[in-house]
Amino acid sequence: MSEQHDLTAHVGLRGVTKVFRGADGAPSVHALGPIDLDLRRGEFFAVVGPSGCGKSTLLEVLAGLSQVSEGNVLIEGKPVGGDIMDGVGVVFQEDACLPWLTVYDNIAFGLMQTDTSRAEIATRVESALTMTGLSGFAGSYPAQLSGGMRQRVCIARTLVLQPRLILLDEPFGALDQQTRLLMGEELLRLWRATGATIFLITHALDEAAMLADRIGIMSARPGRLLEILETGWSRDRDSRLVETAEFGAVTARLWQVLRGESMKSINRDGARA
Amino acid sequence: MSRIGLFRTLVIVGLVGLIEVLCRTGVIDNFTMPPPSRIAKDLQHIVVTGKFNAAIAKTLSSAAIAFAAAVVAGIVAGVLFHSTPRLRRALDPIFATYYAIPVLAFYPLLIIIFGLGDVPKIIIAFMLGVVAVILNTLNGLDRVPPVLAKTARVARLGRVGTALKVTLPSAAPYVLTGVKFAVAYALIGIIGSEFVMSTDGVGFEIAFAYNNFDNATMYPLILLVMIVSIAVNLVLTFWEKRLLIRRGLR
């Protein structure tokens, strides 16, 4: 199997499987896999799938926040263990701002845990503040910001670490549709500016269709990759893409594959309820 | 001042005024209780003459030691118990019934072990305060959003770093509630112990004045204890308010 994989890939997943062992006699849950996937350096890859299919588990495995049951994950050729690897940044769906710190200190938080000099931290934070449009809010506390701005703080906190791989777990899930489109544009701009590889988990088909170079479509649990769809967009795309017929065709294809899987997922959840 | 603050002040002033009137008109005889204005003058005299400075210093320093020990040990134990659920489950019944045990009952035992010095008093005050800090720290840590723990892992913080830089700051409003309890319990423990059996401290002086019908000393010292306790709590409440406002929780 391995000879089919791209050896120059930024990230490689080989037979990745995750089974949650039941505690105190509860049955085990086969959440994920097996999954084989290569991410190209600098690409924007999105994953869509029905609720509960293991999308977030896949991201946690990639991040090193959760260990695989079988298979392995390679980032830049090195196996991912139980720790976050160098050059990897993660943005979560939930508000991960530290409410007792100012925007500036929130963004600097990860860097402060490294040996980076104070001057370098200041330079990088100022740059991230500018990139994410938060320049006027350095001294504000998260409670004084909107949900979209708080998510930008979290993105900025990841950007200052200058990651080569950015993992995003439904980062705009809590935002309204218009804000999500605009945040998507910002994300594309940051992606172009940093040259990082982006791995995005989302439940929103239009978001995946607009942002990604390739979209992995997952099955109902246990999550497997059913299809990988190439969008064929240019790098300098923006939210006006949603007006095009090609965009409609991509989202239609996503739903064509996903509809049956979503029905399976809903029926299973319904039967359990 | 806010309307509620004004109302609160009016209630206190009204109550003190009522007691003043009752004392001045003889409804409460002066042998039982002098008028509040007299108590205030007596307290001023005590402060100016410095007659009880040594006792005040002894009580406050003992309370400060007990308070600091209860806060540090309570927070460390809270973090430890939170990270070891089995240990926590084993200790839960003890925590649940802890305040049903009259800690002062251990005072004679502690005097036998440590002698009639500061140590037994400090241990009593510590024992009273530490569990309140543990319980409130646990309560706060239970409420830390899981995503913040993940954020700490992404920042590659170890267990100590995570506790100091993420989980404890997140739990701070609850920890602070425990700290406020610890202040109160430290004063109760020290002054209560001094009151029961001691040779110095404000509690001893209050008991001594009580036994000698010395209202000019007893009431001002009680007022002094109340002022210290309220002042410390006001500072902590102010700090708590700022903390909650900053987090958008008030």
Image: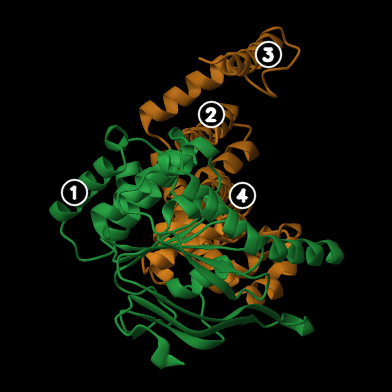
Marks 1/3: CA–CA distance: 66 Å
Pointer 3 chain: B
Where does label 1 land, which residue?
A: A122
Task: Judge left or right: residue A141 versus residue B200.
Answer: left
What is the letter of the orange chain? B
Label 4 SS: helix
Q: Are marks 2 and 3 in contact (CB under 8 Å)?
A: no
Q: Bin the neighbour count of mark 3 within 10 Å (Cα to Cα): few under 14, some 14-19, many 20 and up.
A: some
Label 1 SS: helix
Residue A116 is situated, as x and y percent measured from the top left of the image, at: 19, 62
Q: Is residue A220 visible?
A: yes
Where does label 2 land, which residue?
A: B220
Label 2 SS: helix
Where is residue A7, by image quadrant?
bottom left
Where does label 4 land, which residue?
A: B192
Q: Is residue B147 above or below residue A173?
A: below
